[in-house]
Amino acid sequence: MADVVVIGAGISGAAAAYELASDGCETVLLDRYGPAAMASGWTLAGVRQSGRHPAELPLARDAVARWAGLDEALDGVTRYRRRGNLRLARTPAEVATIRALVAEQSAAGLDLAFLADGAAVRAVAPAVAGEALAASFCPTDGHADPHATVGAFVRAAERRGAALRFGERAVAIEVEQGRVVAVRTDAGRIPAGRVVLAAGVFGNELLGPLGLSVPIEVPMVTVLRSAPGEVVLEPVIGVANADCAGRQEVDGRFRVTSGLVAWHGGMTEGTAPRVDPTARSIAETVARFGAVVPAFLEARIEAMWAGLIDLTPDALPVLDAPAGVAGLVVGMGFSGHGFGLGPVTGRILADLAQGRAPALPIEAFRLDRFAGRNAPGVLPTLHG
Ligand SMILES: Cc1cc2nc3c(=O)[nH]c(=O)nc-3n(C[C@H](O)[C@H](O)[C@H](O)COP(=O)(O)OP(=O)(O)OC[C@H]3O[C@@H](n4cnc5c(N)ncnc54)[C@H](O)[C@@H]3O)c2cc1C
């Protein structure tokens, strides 16, 4: 009998398992594939506060504080770098958008500068081309290595006593008299009074039989990754309309993403799932990011894939212990920006699983805010 079964070893579930095990809970971390097999491996892995919805900003700021001490806390390697985030304006209309963003977020207390012309942008990032008319710059944003980070959470959770069950799929959350009693898997049954569901785009498969669902659409994002090379770009680069983004990893590999494109519905399942990008999206991504960072056009592309996004109607996640199923905690619907939040998401899910009120405000992330809605209403800021 476990105290808590965490379903999903992406960053949300791995961080929750780490926090739960650290709190002394008998924890099982379950994944149908393995750590970072889906969004948490497909991601650009930007760690940003800038451009966040006001409801998410306190969480993002808390997360950034946690990221700074994460290698030490986990006794692991995340390759977290705090090198800033530039959000570029490429048209006069985008300049107005960026100016308004800086005004709003500065008023909320974020250290966010408005870089008023291309010269100011290139003073921060010389690799950015003349396309950039202006930008916002948040020096305390950054990026990390997603596989290394999730692996570090998993190993730290295991050292604190969590049991790891990878290659095992949860097929049902068993509920009796309104209480979670077990998780049924394709390999057996794990009795437990509490479940943290952090299964990303697959979460609704397990919520549906309980009469619950998080309304999500599932678009995809194309990702291109180059061979290692000289580091010419320190900050994460995004653009005001979020139609591309990119950064360089610590060894100089470019990791570049498209905006949201329609998912063709295909997925190849092996030891990890794979979604292939379309030629059109690859071409658009190369052209768009290459226009803002020309050095990318000379890079050798080593890998490409597409990542799926769990996009909710308001592009905010669900972090909740829904009424009606005692012992169930849901963390999903991160809408393309849940990586940076990972360390604080884990803390919040662990608190909810233990019946404690999280230290940060999570009212905006209740599941019942969607009662009667099921279509996305806003676009997420896919931007590192
Ligand atoms: C291309 C791309 C770029 C992104 N860029 C950024 C960015 O720059 N910054 C940022 O903050 N966020 C970004 N995001 C979003 C971020 O990566 C995700 O929000 C975050 O990784 C979600 O983590 P998760 O743990 O909630 O879900 P996931 O990582 O998807 O993990 C869910 C896990 O659940 C497992 N699972 C599912 N069903 C079952 C089951 N039945 N039984 C057992 N296991 C199951 C899966 O195998 C998977 O490992 C991006 C996403 C993509 C795709």
Image (tube, grey):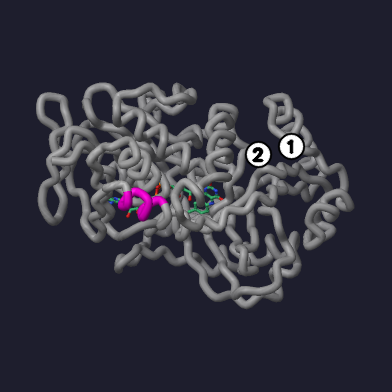
Real-space CA distance between mark 1 and mark 2, rounded to the nearest whole angstrom = 7 Å
Image quadrant for the N terminus? top left
Q: Which residues are magenta?
A: 153-159
Please, what is the three-letter code of the amino acid marked with disc 1?
Answer: Leu
* Total residue callouts: 2
- Point 73% across, 29% down: residue: 106
- Point 70% across, 45% down: residue: 240
Q: To which quarter of the image does residue 69 belong?
A: top right
Number of other residues with Cα within 10 Å of mark 2, as a class: few under 14, some 14 to 19, many 20 or more:
many
Q: What element does badge 2 sit on? A: loop
Please, what is the three-letter code of the amino acid marked with disc 2?
Answer: Ser
User: From this viewpoint, is residue 372 visible?
Assistant: no
Q: What element does badge 1 sit on? A: loop
- Tag 2 residue: 50
Question: Which SS does the magenta portion mostly show?
Answer: helix
Left or right, 340 with respect to 151, comes to right
Position of residue 131 relative to residue 295, above or below, is above
Residue 169 tag number: none
Q: To which quarter of the image does residue 125 belong?
A: bottom right
- Point 62% across, 69% down: residue: 251
Q: Position of residue 115 (x, y in %)?
A: 83, 43
Q: Position of residue 322 (x, y in %)?
A: 30, 26
Position of residue 264 relative to residue 105, above or below, is below
- Tag 1 residue: 112
- Point 30% across, 33% down: residue: 329
For marks 1 and 2 on the same chain, the one whose residue lies earlier in the sequence: 2
